[in-house]
Image: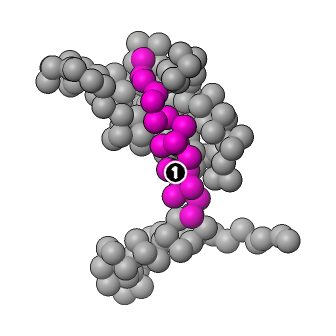
Amino acid sequence: MMFEKKKRNIFKPVSEQPDNFIDGFGEWLDTKDGEDAMQAIDDINEFLRDALVDTNERKIILSDDVKLTITQIAEKIKQHSEAPLEVIIRHIILWLQMEYVPDNLSEKEMENFEIQIEEWIENYKNDA
């Protein structure tokens, strides 16, 4: 079965926007984009459950001590996921920014860690 790719306009006039965030989010979840995002989040969380992050080498360390880049992790997840690769990459970046929290860091060390993550992501986006 062939699916026609439709352009989505996320910048609709205010009169066409949902009445509230919850309604809008619920509607979005029912779209292909919403389904892809939720699938990617589930797959990433499962795959990276016990992962660590090495900000110096800019790699994610899997539970078997294999160190991989964002792209390498995304390609590995894609082998087992129906979500598009670009959605997987976007959610790995979000995982790095918002989900992953290293253990036993002081407040200052955590600030430095967050700066290193942002620099890593900025460089990754610039190189892509």
Q: Position of residue 39 (x, y in %)?
A: 57, 55
Q: Position of residue 20 (x, y in %)?
A: 30, 79
Type of colouring: one colour
Q: Using the image, determine if residue 94 lies above or below residue 100.
A: below
The residue where tag 1 is placed is 42
Q: Quadrant of the C terminus?
A: top right
Q: Is residue 76 left or right of residue 126?
A: right
Camera-side residue of 109 and 65? 65
Does the magenta run of residues contain 28? no
Residue at 52 percent of width and 65 percent of height: 34
Camera-side residue of 119 and 58? 58
Does the magenta run of residues contain 50? yes
Q: Is residue 95 at least partly visible in the picture?
A: yes
Residue at 32 percent of width and 84 percent of height: 19
* Amino acid type, mark 1: Asp
Residue 18, image quadrant: bottom left
Residue at 49 percent of width and 35 percent of height: 48
The number of callouts visible is 1
Residue at 40 percent of width and 71 percent of height: 25
Q: Which stretch appears magenta?
A: 35-54
Q: Quadrant of the N terminus?
A: bottom right
Question: Magenta segment, principal secondary structure?
Answer: helix
Q: Which residue is situated farthest in the left direction here? A: 107
Q: Is residue 116 left or right of residue 84?
A: left
Q: Position of residue 43 (x, y in %)?
A: 56, 46
Residue 104, image quadrant: top left
Q: Using the image, determine if residue 57 lies above or below residue 111.
A: above
